[in-house]
Each structure stands twice: as structure tokens, then as C-alpha cells.
Amino acid sequence: MTTTNRPAKGRAPASPDLLAVSDLRVAFRMRKAAPVEAVRGVSFAIPPRSTVALVGESGSGKSVSAMAIVRLLPDNAEVDAASRIDYDGVNLLQAPAQRLRQLRGREISVVFQDPLSSLNPVFTVGDQVAEALRLHASLSRRQAQARAEELLAEVGIPHPRERMRAFPHELSGGQQQRVMIAAAIACEPKLLIADEPTTALDVTVQRQIVELMQRLREKRAMSMLFISHDLALVGEIADRVVVLRDGRVREAGPAADLFAAPRDPYTRALLACRPRVDVRLRRLPVVEQFLAAGPDAPVPQAAAPAPAAERTSAAGPPLVEVRGLRKEFRLKTGLLSHRRVEAVRDASFTIARRRTLGVVGESGSGKTTVGLMLMRLVEPTAGEIRFGGEDLLSMPADRLMDYRRRVQIIFQNPYASLNPRFRVDQILVEPMRIHRIGADDAARRDAAADLLERVGMPRASLSKYPHEFSGGQRQRIAIARCLALRPELLVCDESVSALDVSVQATVINLLLDLQEELGISYLFISHDLAAIRSVADEILVMNRGEIVERGSADAIFGAPAHEYTRRLLSSVPRGISGANGRRIV
């Protein structure tokens, strides 16, 4: 990281705030282009013993602002010399390296978004938590290990003494994040920076992590900078909220005021674009509606609820019938030993034509395994799958090629599911060529251009590579690739879970439009109940490989019968928390 122009001067006047960011400007040097401004004059303050949230979509400058505080920006980052980040009266942007090493981990700690990539895979979790204690608290190895065990217990890791010897890959995502939090609070920092710490977690684990961080903040009297794109979640943890877009502050203020009367159209958009759990709308609002309305225009009205009769009428026999589906995995536990794990037990359901079956549950519930068995990417241990009346499991090999054309899958991670070496036209044309759709490559390329327009992408995208697009745009390309084969069933495996709320709304609207236009059926797999509510006609709730509840979306969300379903619904972020409880947004 470099600093441009003249150096900032001296020690700042005494301030009641723990940390103050003033006119922060960060640009990134590009090899063959002009520098890209990522942060453009951002200012905010963090008082002692409080939580300030930075909110915005991907590319808004949230993480860049946070990493500037601890000087962990990449080498091509340039921070304007007029910018200040004052901590204890010292501008951190000009602090010497030795001072920064003393601060990081000891007084200012960071919890990153992806714990598996942040934790060292070759060291035990006990060693990684103890490392900060040995480095900053000058404890002996034995003392550090004992304190690390206490910290693992404090953050809710079961059997902490045993887990001390575990490696990161042996823990669940929620447990990995708890280890990250334990390491971050080991030296009792004054400021904890949490960069999207719950984005990839199940709703129940997300609830546990948020409540844990709240308890730790109060117990240890520390401040927290919480970064998220989800305003509903932020409303339950933050005292103050700073809304960013395109590197600028759009709105800032106390969380209660911002939720009660958001002034900026972009803030109103973030609040309105999140799918709702209380009702299914015909279409979700999108950011562009609010920004086009202007600051003084009335708030755009949400689409009316879709009539129940319109959503539940099924035409003809079901497209998919599943009976007694079971999958068992053999896991190696030693040189000559193994154990059997039932991932799915006795699953039975149907999917009607032109309808959506939602499958919801926590990680490890078996929902993705069900989708992969339906794709014949994982072979069932037992059970029956009929597609269009034909037995899928006894289907001869020469018929499987046609089946794979009729059933397609949209994966969760659009960054990993597109070949980075292929242009978009190659990505779309290749499956058509394999399945002999189209007269020749010229006709297939024309069809690919039409598919891009159908999913809201310009024809010029054909000549570009995946890295040139945002996450939402890549997911649209993945959907276009599926549509190229004219499928009858789309398996959507957490296909909107990792997207910003506004991009998520756009993709959900696209899926609903395509279903109405093309008559596609969906198996929609997600741990996000709000997203499930927006698309599903019927819902299966899975827990530990079993279907514990099934029914219409209205019945599941209106009057859940199973305790597990009620627990999932109660964990959905809904808005502001305070002395009188949560206020639903």
C-alpha cells in the first residue's frame, strides 16, 4: 500500500471516539488502465463500547475501508495523503510498521468472511488461537494452550480440549468461524472488525454467531465494526449504521432512526429488496426502481402478493416422482476401518410441471445430496426416481444423454462454475454443440446472444471472459447456459445465497419470469428461508437427512408444525433489536 501526495501531519486532538475515519480515499493502480477509485471520501467514527456497521453491496468500499484501518490493503492500493484514520490520537495511515504490529491482534483484531481460507490448514486450531497469545501476551506455550482452551469454551466450541487438536477442515463452518473469533479476542482487543462474518452460514448458525459477538462485545467492553450487505441482520446488532455505495457514504446515523425513516433511496432499496418471509410477492423490488424515483419521490410500491390459487394449481401428472430415496456414504476412519453415514433417509416427494419445490435445511441436512441424486451425479443407495413417468435409475446409458439435457443445475458459486479460460460464447455454445442443438456454430452463437438478452445481459458479453463480470452477472450467464439446452427441470443449489440482496432480487425475478415464459420446473435448494418463500410453491424441510415437514409455502411459513421448522423461522434476521425486542422491518 502506498500513500500519495504529502504526508498527513501530527497527532490529532483528543477525541471521545475510539477510532475516527476522516475523508478516506483509496484507489487501485491498474496495469493498462487508469486507477480505479474504490473509496471516495468516506468518514465515520466508532465510539467506545459500541457497534458501527458498514452496509452496502459488493464493490461499495466496505471491506477496503475496513482493511485500510489495519493497513492490510494490497500493494497496488494508493491512499490519499489527506485521509486520516485516528486511533488513540495517532493517524494509523502514517504509523510506523512496529506500531502497527503492536496494534494488530492486540488492540485491533479482524474476523474475516471465509474462515476456511483464513485459518492455516496445517496447524491445529489450538495452536492458531495460542499463537496470538504467545506473540502479544508473552505467554509460555503451556500457558497459551491453556488460555486457548478457555477461549474455545467461551465462544461455544463443544468439547474444547478435544477440539484443540483438530484441524480446520475437521470443523463445521460455524465452528471454524468461532475459532476465528476466539483468536481475534484472545488479547482482549479494544476494536473488533468483523468482515461479513456470517454471509455463508446457515440462518441458525448465523443467529448463534451474531448473538455470540454481541455477548462478547458487552462482556469485554470492546467496540465492533460490523461489515455486511444485509440491513436486516445489521439492524439486530448495530448501534450506528453507515450505508456505502460506489465508495461514498449515502446515509449514516443511529440504527433505530435509519430503519424507522431511511432518507436515501439506496437505503430504502436495501431494506425493500430483501425477500420477505411473511408473504410471497409477484416480483421483488430492485434497487433501480428506488434510485430512479429520486430522493423526494414516494417510495415505489411492492408488487402485490401472488394469489394462492394461482400458485398451487398443477397441470397434469407430476414431472418428478421420488419414493424412499436413500443415500449412504462410507467414510474412512483408519487404515482398515470405516463408518457409514446416512446422508438421506427415506425421502419421498413430487415436483409438478411449471412449479417450484423448495428444499430448506441447515448444512449437512442432505438437501444438496437430494439434488445431486436427481441429477444422477450421485448414485442413490436405494429408492426410486421417476422423471416424466420413466424410471431414472434403470435408464440405459444411451438414454442418459437426453436426460442430462432435460435436467440442468445452477450451482451456488458462479465464480467456480464457469470455465475461466472460456469466453462467454464458448461457455454457451459448447453444451449446444454436445447435444446437437442448432444447425451450425453460427446458428448456435446467434442462439447464445438471444439467451444472454433473455437473462438481461448485452450481446457484447459474448466476447468477454467470466472474470470481467460481477457475481450476479456470472449467475445470469450460468442460467443462460442451462437454458441453452431447453431443460424441463432446473436444480438451483443455493444459487442466490451468496449474492447481494439487490442482485438476489434480480435473479429471483428472472427465475420467476423464465418459469412463467418457458414452463420450467424448479428444485430450489437453500438455507435462506426468505429466498425460499419468494419462489417455492411447496416446501420440504430437511434435518439430518430426513424430511421433517412438508407442505405448501403458505402452510409452512404460516403455521409450521415441527419444532425444527419453527427454530429456522425464528432465526431469520428481521430488523432492529433493542430493549423492547426486535422490530420487524
Image (cartoon, rainbow, N blue to C red):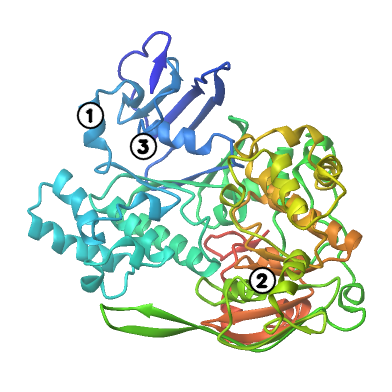
- The answer to which of marks 1 and 3 sits earlier in the sequence is 3
Q: From what the image shows, is residue 473 above or below residue 89?
A: below
Q: Is residue 576 left or right of residue 301?
A: left
Q: Nearer the viewer, mark 2 or mark 3?
A: 2
Which residue was labeled with disc 3? 18
Q: Residue flagged by tag 1: what amino acid is it?
A: Arg
Residue 398, percent across and down?
73, 72
- Assign the C terminus to one quadrant of the image: bottom right
272 left or right, relative to 256: right
> How far apart, in angstroms, are the residues tagged by discs 1 and 3?
17 Å
User: Residue 43: where, in percent of width, then height?
Assistant: 51, 28
Instruction: Tell me if label 1 and label 3 are in contact, CB under 8 Å.
Output: no
Choose mark 2 or mark 1, whichever is in front: 2
| Towards the viewer: 421 or 321 | 421
Which residue in the protein does label 2 denote?
A: 375
Q: Position of residue 478 (x, y in %)?
A: 70, 51
Q: Amino acid at mark 2?
A: Met
**Left or right: residue 178 compared with residue 342:** left
Q: CA distance from mark 2 to mark 3?
A: 54 Å
Say which of marks 1 and 3 sits in front. 1
Crowding at dot 3, Cα within 10 Å, few <14 / some 14-19 / many 20+, comes out as some
Disc nearer the start of the sequence (2/3): 3
Q: Are marks 2 and 1 in contact (CB under 8 Å)?
A: no
Q: Which residue is mark 1?
A: 99
